[in-house]
């Protein structure tokens, strides 16, 4: 029984280590996007401002009333075993980027992390449980996580759930990065240390930035739509040079905005007309669906020079009501 419990705790701690390194961030900038630590070669970028998410009306409700009651007991048990805090409030932001749109781009993606969680202590605790498991079984246990480099910065290796190699490092202060590609990790460290060009030097994504109220930000450079299998309803994306999307709360609404950049002002006008036509068609085909009709009424299309923005709003009160109904 004790051996079984040890194995379960070992697996739980390893999972927490993955989540802790992948989801924790903290800095003087809070959850804001830091372009200086993102590669100038980035072709796509995803940024989640967890600070803003937890402060938002919908995010705070889901955290406090839906997720926290379910997770609190297990998290408290693991915190007791580790001797470190894993409170969600310690999570501030996640930034993930990649330099290509090939199949399985996650294999070469880099996650950038700033964390107050004591990752080295977590690693040591996982290793202690591995050693305990080996002692109890009388057999050598394959390492699941270990320190592979201490200077000039700490670098760790971890075995993923599917057997993949995962590398994460602490190159500066409380900043961590994580990737499945060791060479990408080393390149990321060079950017963080100011030895390689960052996103502020990028011709592709330099001018794409999240709104002040954004919780989620996605940016994609030229080429994002060349090989993607887009449905007929999304053919407007084929006309874009680059794209960005933001999601957040503004006043009493959840707001999502998709911004597409066309090659010319004339092409942008065509995209605007196409988007307006799609909304009109949706209104006609879904006239008996009140939720769709409300979204259509709260959808606007605007054009500024060669950029087209599609903005959708939805009532926060109605969103919360639907969430409460789902979790009953």
Image: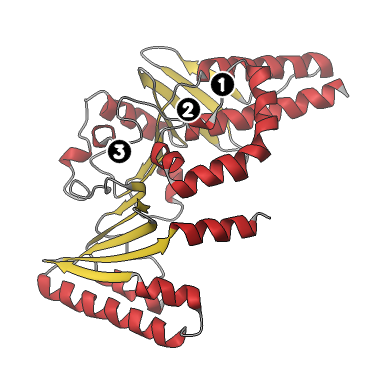
Q: How far, Cα to Cα, is label 3 from label 1?
A: 25 Å
Residue placed farthest to the right in the image? 1
Q: Which residue position holds label 2?
A: 90
Q: Which residue position holds label 1?
A: 85
Of residues 82 and 28, the one nearer the viewer is: 28
Measured from the top left, where is residue 81 in percent x and y? 68, 18
Of residues 148 and 271, the one nearer the viewer is: 271
Q: Residues within 10 Å of mark 1 (few under 14, many from 20)?
A: some
Q: Quadrant of the C terminus?
A: bottom right
Q: What number of labels is visible?
A: 3
Residue visible at 30% across and 73% down in the picture: 236
Query: Which label was assigned to residue 33?
Result: 3
Q: Residues within 10 Å of mark 2 (few under 14, many from 20)?
A: some
Placement of 289 over or under 161, stated as above or below: below
Placement of 56 over or under 316, stated as above or below: above
Mark closer to the observer (3, 2): 2
* Earlier-in-chain disc, 3 versus 1: 3
Q: Are marks 2 and 1 in contact (CB under 8 Å)?
A: yes
């Amino acid at each position: 029984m004790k051996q079984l419990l040890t194995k379960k705790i070992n697996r739980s701690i390893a999972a927490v280590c993955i989540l802790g390194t992948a989801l924790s961030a903290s800095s003087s900038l809070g959850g804001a996007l830091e372009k200086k630590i993102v590669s100038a070669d980035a072709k796509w970028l995803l940024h989640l401002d967890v600070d803003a998410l937890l402060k938002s009306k919908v995010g705070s409700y889901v955290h406090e009333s839906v997720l926290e009651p379910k997770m609190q007991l297990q998290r408290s048990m693991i915190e007791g075993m580790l001797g470190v805090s894993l409170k969600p409030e310690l999570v501030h932001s996640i930034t993930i980027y990649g330099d290509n749109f090939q199949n399985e781009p996650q294999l070469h993606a880099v996650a950038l992390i700033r964390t107050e969680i004591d990752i080295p202590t977590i690693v040591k605790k996982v290793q202690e449980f591995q050693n305990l498991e080996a002692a109890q079984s009388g057999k050598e246990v394959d390492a699941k996580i270990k320190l592979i480099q201490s200077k000039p910065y700490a670098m760790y290796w971890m075995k993923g759930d599917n057997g993949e190699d995962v590398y994460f490092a602490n190159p500066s202060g409380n900043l961590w990065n994580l990737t499945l590609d060791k060479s990408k990790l080393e390149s990321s460290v060079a950017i963080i240390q100011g030895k390689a060009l960052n996103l502020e030097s990028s011709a592709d994504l330099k001018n794409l930035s999240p709104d002040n109220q954004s919780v989620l930000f996605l940016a994609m450079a030229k080429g994002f739509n060349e090989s993607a299998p887009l449905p007929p309803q999304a053919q407007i994306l084929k006309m874009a040079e680059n794209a960005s999307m933001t999601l957040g709360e503004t006043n009493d609404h959840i707001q999502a905005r998709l911004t597409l950049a066309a090659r010319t002002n004339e092409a942008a006008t065509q995209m605007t007309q196409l988007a307006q036509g799609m909304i009109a068609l949706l209104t006609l085909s879904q006239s008996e669906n009140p939720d769709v009709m409300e979204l259509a009424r709260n959808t606007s299309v605007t054009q500024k020079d060669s950029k087209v923005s599609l903005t959708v709003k939805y009532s926060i009160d109605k969103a919360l009501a639907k969430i409460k109904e789902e979790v009953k």
